[in-house]
Amino acid sequence: MNRTGRVSLTRWLWLLVLLSATASAGWQASLPEARLLGSGEFSWFGFKVYHARLWGRALPLTDDSPFALELTYKRRIRRDELVQTSLDEIQRLSGTAVSPAQLKDWQAQMQRAFVDVEPGQRITGVFLPGRGVAFFVDQRLPYRVDDPAFARAFFAIWLDPRTRNPQLRAQLLGQ
């Protein structure tokens, strides 16, 4: 290989290194000043389901506070179960404020964003104020939902005072 070929190959290798470093930065690149605000376990009938960690800049969270909710799963759960459980909770908390058409659209969005999870796998949702939510699976960004109403409804599952698990909410909010 001649000198020109080696220089070109070297440039391509450096470009690949830079691109892979950016790709592996994960959700932290969206929220560089984040610190751990709180964490807790979610169990269902005595079975550990996931460990949750809330990352952000400060408490209390406001409508213009970006934050990340990281769930590290302890059990194998199918994507369809994750989507349906999330949809049920969104509907329970939102009531008639969310139309059937919105719910159907949000179901499709979550089907694209979520995966079948295995023990040890992480899904992190990053709340992007005024824009929506970015979902990361094990630090990779598979999907982004550009819908602020969906983002608020989705994170309400954990952070709304009417959540099904007030103890976990309190732990996440550092109370």
Image (spheres, grey):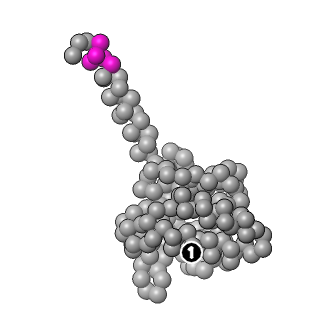
Question: In which quadrant will I find the C terminus?
Answer: bottom right
Q: Residue furthest right?
A: 97
State whether residue 67 is above or below residue 107.
above
- The main secondary structure of the magenta stretch is helix
Residue 113: x and y in percent read 53, 58
Q: Closer to the camera, 60 or 143?
A: 143
Q: Position of residue 133 (x, y in %)?
A: 61, 55
Magenta range: 4-8
Q: How many marks?
A: 1
**91 in relation to 127, above or below:** below
- Tell me where residue 16 appears, x and y as whole percent: 37, 33
Q: Is residue 131 visible?
A: yes
Quadrant the N terminus occupies: top left
Q: Residue furthest top?
A: 3
User: Considering only vertical position in the picture, is 28 above or below 72?
Assistant: above
User: Which of the 4 image quarters holds residue 148?
Assistant: bottom right
Q: Residue at x 51, y 70 (%)?
A: 80
The answer to whether residue 124 is left or right of residue 65 is left
Front residue of this view, candidates 172 and 10: 10
Residue 3 percent coordinates (x, y) = 25, 12
What amino acid type should be assigned to the residue bearing mark 1? Thr
Q: Quadrant of residue 152?
A: bottom right
